[in-house]
Amino acid sequence: MFSFLLKRISVVIPTFLGVTLLTFSLIRMIPGDPVELMAGERGVDPVRHAELLAQMGLDKPLLVQYWHYLTGIFQGDLGTSIVTREPVIREFFTLFPATLELSLCAIIIAVSIGLPAGIIAAVKRGKATDYTVMGLSLTGYSMPIFWWGLLLILLFSVGLGWTPVSGRISATFWVDEVTGFMLIDSLLSDEVGAFASAVQHLILPSIVLATIPLAVIARMTRSAMLEVLREDYIQVARAKGLAMWLVVCVHALRNALIPVITVIGLQVGVLMAGAILTETIFSWPGVGKWMLDSIYRRDYPSVQGGILLISCMVILVNLTVDIFYGVVNPRIRHNR
Amino acid sequence: MQKNLLRFLPVLLLLLFVGQVQAKTLVYCSEGSPEGFNPSLYTAGTTFDASSKTIFEGLTHFVRGTTELEPGMAESWTVSDDGKTYTFKLRKGVKFHSSKSFKPTRDMNADDVIFTFERQWKKDNPYHTVSGGNYEYFNGMSMPDLLKEIVKVDDYTVKFILNRPEAPMLANLAMDFAVIQSKEYADAMMKAGTPEKVDQWPIGTGPFVFQGYKKDAQIRYTAFKDYWRGKAAIDKLVFSITPDASVRYAKLKAGECQIMPYPNPADVAAMKKDPKINLLEQEGLNVGYLAYNTQVAPFDKVEVRKALNMAMNKQAIIDTVFQGAGKIAKNPIPPTIWSYNEATVDDPYDPVAAKKMLADAGYPNGFSMKIWAMPVQRPYNPNARRMAEVIQADFAKVGVKVEIISYEWGEYLKRSKDVKRDGAVLLGWTGDNGDPDNFLAVLLGCDGVGGSNRAQWCYKPFEDLIQKAKVVSDPAERTKLYEEAQIVFKSQAPWATIAHSVVFMPLAKNVENFKIDPFGGHIFYGVDLK
Amino acid sequence: MAENLEIAVDDDFSPPGPFREFWNYFSANRGALLGFSLIVLVLLAALFANFLTPHSPFEQYRQHILTPPAWQEGGLWRFPLGTDEVGRDILTRLIYGGRLSLFIGMMVVSLSLVLGTLIGLISGYAKGMTDTLIMRAMDIVMALPSLLLALAIVTILGPGLINASIAIAVTYLPHYVRITRASVIAETSKDYVIASKVSGAGVMRLIFITILPNCMAPLIVQASLGFSNAILDAAALGFIGLGAQPPSPEWGSMLANALEFIQRAWWVVTFPGLMILLTVLAFNLMGDGLRDALDPKMKL
């Protein structure tokens, strides 16, 4: 068990280092002179240009720059944003709760709808219900989510006026930040209607973000359930006269859940990518929108730091899922 | 019995809250997030809207809605005869804001003024490197070259001694980077070990007090009760950050905000017709131009430059590129700047005459040239690529073949400065301090050749005029000099002046007394809600 | 009297060839057939675009900016699905956009398939240090969310359709590498490969003639799914403004300014997205059908 853990963790470290190298080189390869960019039409004289370049640490050889970057990471310093002059890590974690809130809601929606849908489809295999569920999930899987978001805005915000168009909460409310989660903070605040406003603002973006994970979870659950339902012990249980739903929930689900949970874990990467698009459409002040803005503004340290942090999160989640899978499934533990 | 009362409690509470909400709140749908809250560190208008224009004030101040100066933190000033010494008498009784971690114990005085400038100027000032230590505008306006010394004469008198006379100095001091910071606050934060707090939780002497910033979402201010001009008419000010223009429009229509900047040009027509929206408009403090390289043939000939100017259909550019949100430019400075010469005559659109002029200059069959088009959107040019294509079509009619080239923005700026640059470059300029010198000297002065003077133009008659206007302090005399300079410019045509953008400002009908700031800022002091 | 009782005997007892077998399974899946026919439709439309519509996708009809679709008030049958903000016919742009989408799909899939397979073959066959290095590199690429990595690469290369395709292809590499490598490892331990090796077959022959054909099935399935994902990712990049540049009629970039018109011109927002959905759906249906037809486990 221990050696399994150790093995898995030891794989992560070179991957992490590789990611730092990748993000560092990617950003350095972006064309354009950041000093000129900052100066704009006014321009800088060559002396000041060199001064600013040195200030940003961009005048040293690449290897030295990489070394500084790496040592900085281990001290928690991911550089300073060119635009706001704030530490990148602080910018990221100020905005992260918004993305986290959105992603959690999305996952909750995806699991609470996708899981039962997949189970039902598996149990009713071949019938109309199965085809409907699979058809819908395939559609969700094929949906360009930025268009889906626009469509929902068109229908519900512009057309029916049920939901607001952007933001996390109406501008008339000022909610003190305690946890960073608008739902919790609005409940804690003493403003009337703040919570309702927060919920209203959260509905559409979470649905949009949840669409692809929902579809994937539904499909995965269905195929995992189908595999399990074919097993002998299930047939025995049925032969013994147990009701179908009992068989499904008590016996089959537990075993089908394992691959499903790994799939849920792997959706984190999808969620991060989806967050970029969703946050842009709904002006949701989270990390995804910040990444896109930073790319537009050529804010290299922010882009670098953001990619690194997001990748770390993905790596950590994958590691956790891997370990969980190993814990739960002894065959994986003891394999090569 | 008790149950009944309990049932009415929410209603009673609601009534209480309704009663509370008599405070006037103005919501402004801003177009982006501020870079930070210390204006001396940044350059974006969005940042200035959120900091210098609300929380702070400088020694001198632009009269709202104009480019004229009035006293601000300085009550009065005198300029020495040689134009090198400015003595400011500071206003007494000006109070600073307070916050949860700071309560001022004294009024604004000379120490604050000196700290504000020394922080940006002296490398040994303990605050110089805080928050990145990059003071763009302080350096960009050449303050380190200009300032010889700042002297505290007494608690309410400060002397600025310059190395050379510079008439625009007073205008410079009204700019956003020069607003007065609190030395007391800076000292307190340094002592507490948190100097960055000065830049993150700003304390100033302006009309609004900072109450908090939710990153990329909202900024909140309350009116400063002790503001020296009198408390603002509105009690609460909220910036609701909404990057998308159509969403801003939707919010304006829904009443979620009362003022919004930068509407989509396509929405302007609908806004004009909407009875619930009051649409203001004004030319921006900018100019978009095509700069010829006057040091490279055939553009070293005035006739060639003038001919090309006459071949350009500027109205078509306003229609297709600006979609109506622009006005044809005839002078290198916009009409909102004092000394704008109404009497100059723009080159008429006359392709036939242009072709003849080219033939007379020795190019009967035209020639080939390059036009540089910017890859990014700028206030003075929403779509340079499209503009270049229109000009390409126009020039083709007089026999001039145009190749359009572009570079990544940073590269573009760098390469276009080259004295040997091949081709005419599309660029522009947004004014910093409302002074004509800020346009004419920076963009067309001999010092700018190889730098911001993209026409690489150095012409003695013009240079003499603007250099003289730099040192003379009498505004009437300066006006005459600049008017003459514009006539010289027109006759020499180093540029094709193309357009000034038009700023549209949609307001809700109940907003009173809002004035468009010629500098492109958004000022909320003086605004009232019916 | 014995009559000659001729019983018609079907002599052909040979099993159906691989393609026949595949087609039997594939056509039984109605969804797959639907997907396949949709794709053929899009392909034909893309190929014969010039004949299907009188307009050019770039021509701007200044008098007819933002006309609604023909069945709405103010619409014209000349522009069946309406026009966009500079007066270009939307239906024409959708049809020509099909060309771009198919091109993107092909380019991305061929790049990532060829490169990924090669790398996977090398990795699986070489084993040892090479294998570990390559797999670590693939882990790194997979650690970054694909859209983010594609964004970063396009920012370096500059916006444009070709650069977007390259960026997306890079993010798909790990999938092909893994599949190929897994197949190679599985196959190399099998007897027939060992037999070939012992008989003196060279490395090249082993890899390309012996092993590769047995990896084809999962690769084909992955490729068809890759097609649909490529179209989606390219549309996302186009939407952000870093993919196909205007005035290119790529479906995603047609939506780039869509938020502006969501109140006034719903057709500018709806139709390009619908095309993306239908095309991607078609490829996914076909991919599913392919998988079911090619997966031996399902052949019970």
Image (tube, coloured by chain):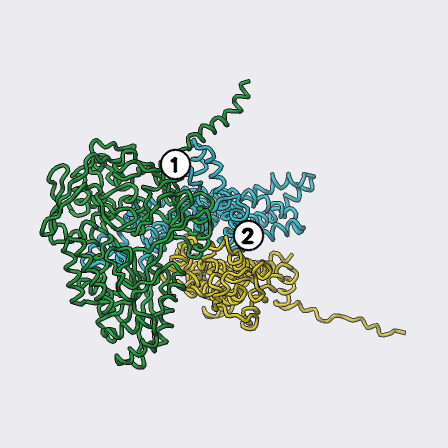
Q: Quadrant of residue A99?
A: top left
User: Spatial distance from mark 1 to mark 2, Cα to Cα?
Assistant: 46 Å
Quadrant for the N terminus of chain B in the image? top right
Chain A colour is cyan
Q: Amino acid at mark 1?
A: Lys
Judge from the rendering whether residue B476 lies leftward or rightward of residue B244; answer left or right.
left
- The residue indicated by pointer 2 is A140
Asked whether residue A209 is in view, the answer is yes
> Label 2 crowding class (10 Å Cα cut-off): few <14, some 14-19, many 20+?
many
**Chain drawn green in the picture:** B
- A132 to the left or right of A89: right
- Residue C200 in sight: no
Chain in yellow, by letter, is: C
Q: Position of residue A129 (x, y in %)?
A: 65, 49
Spot occupied by residue B495 in the image (x, y as percentages of width and height): 27, 67
Locate residue B488, reporting x and y percent: 21, 66
Query: Closest to the observer: A258 or B278?
Result: B278
